Amino acid sequence: MKKLLFALLLISGLSLHAQSQKIGFVDSQVLYQNYAPAIKAQQDLQALQQNWTRTRDSLTQVFQVNVQAYQNQRAMMTPQKQQETEQQLMMEQNTIIQQEQLIMQKGQSVMKPIRDAVNDAIASVAKDQKMAFIFDKGVEGVVNILHFADSQYDMTYKVLDQLKSK
């Protein structure tokens, strides 16, 4: 009986505590579209991606020409020459893949300080506003765990102000 009474008191206490917690949300798209360092980083990444796309297309064309030449001449090659050519083709393919990975890593490294600044600003606003949780509306169609939110709890522009004040 004592355990049941204790459990009921504990549950009601947690329920009352949960009701008093403030929850807010932000729209990260708005943050990244209005935060100058994020805009600059997006532009830099877009230029990097365009350059890489041209380079990748060129490398891919050369690779495809080399594969086609190998396939056409393979029957006339010695087994050793076939193996050497196949290894050379694999090296070319690996070079393209490695460069693609380097571009992705570069993008992540460019965005990391910006994501950190956004997260720090969100944490700061959460503390200032005494929020227990701040959710992200997410990118429409990608991740949207916030299905409804009253606009009075929108912390987006407070976070943006916090970002711009640094």
Image (cartoon, grey):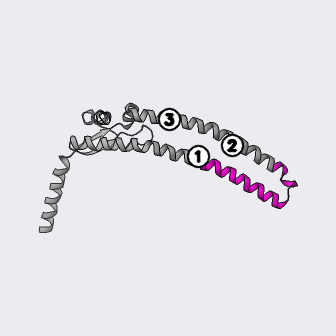
Q: Is 75 part of what is drawn in magenta?
A: yes
Real-space Cα distance between discs 3 and 1? 16 Å
> Which three-letter amino acid code belongs to the residue tagged 1?
Glu
Q: Earlier in the sequence, mark 3 or mark 1?
A: 3
> Which disc is residue 100 wearing?
1
Q: Residue at x 49, y 33 (%)?
A: 43
Q: Using the rendered view, name the quadrant where residue 81 is placed.
A: bottom right
Give the extent of the magenta segment.
Answer: 71-99
Give the residue type that dot 2 points to: Thr
The crowding category of the residue bearing disc 2, from other C-alpha atoms within 10 Å (few below 14, some 14 to 19, many at least 20), is some
Residue under numbered circle 2: 60
Contact flag, marks 2 and 3 (Cβ < 8 Å): no
Q: Position of residue 47 (x, y in %)?
A: 54, 34
Say which label, 2 or 3, has the lower sequence index: 3
**Distance from Cα at disc 1 to Cα at disc 2:** 12 Å
Tell me whether circle 1 and circle 2 mark residues in contact (CB < 8 Å): no
Q: Nearer the viewer, mark 3 or mark 1?
A: 3
Q: CA distance from mark 2 to mark 3?
A: 24 Å
Q: Position of residue 162 (x, y in %)?
A: 29, 36
The image shows residue 58 at horizontal and vertical percentages of 68, 39
Quick check: is 81 in the magenta stretch? yes
Rendered residue at 59%/36% (across/down): 51
In front: 31, or 6? 31
Mark 1 nearby-residue class (10 Å; few <14, some 14–19, many ≥20): some
Q: Which residue is mark 3?
A: 44
Element type at marker 3? helix
Label 3 sits on what residue type?
Answer: Asp
Comes first in the chain, label 1 or label 2: 2
Q: Where residue 93 appears, x then y in whole percent?
A: 67, 50
Q: Nearer the viewer, mark 2 or mark 3?
A: 3
Observer-nearest of 49 and 165? 165
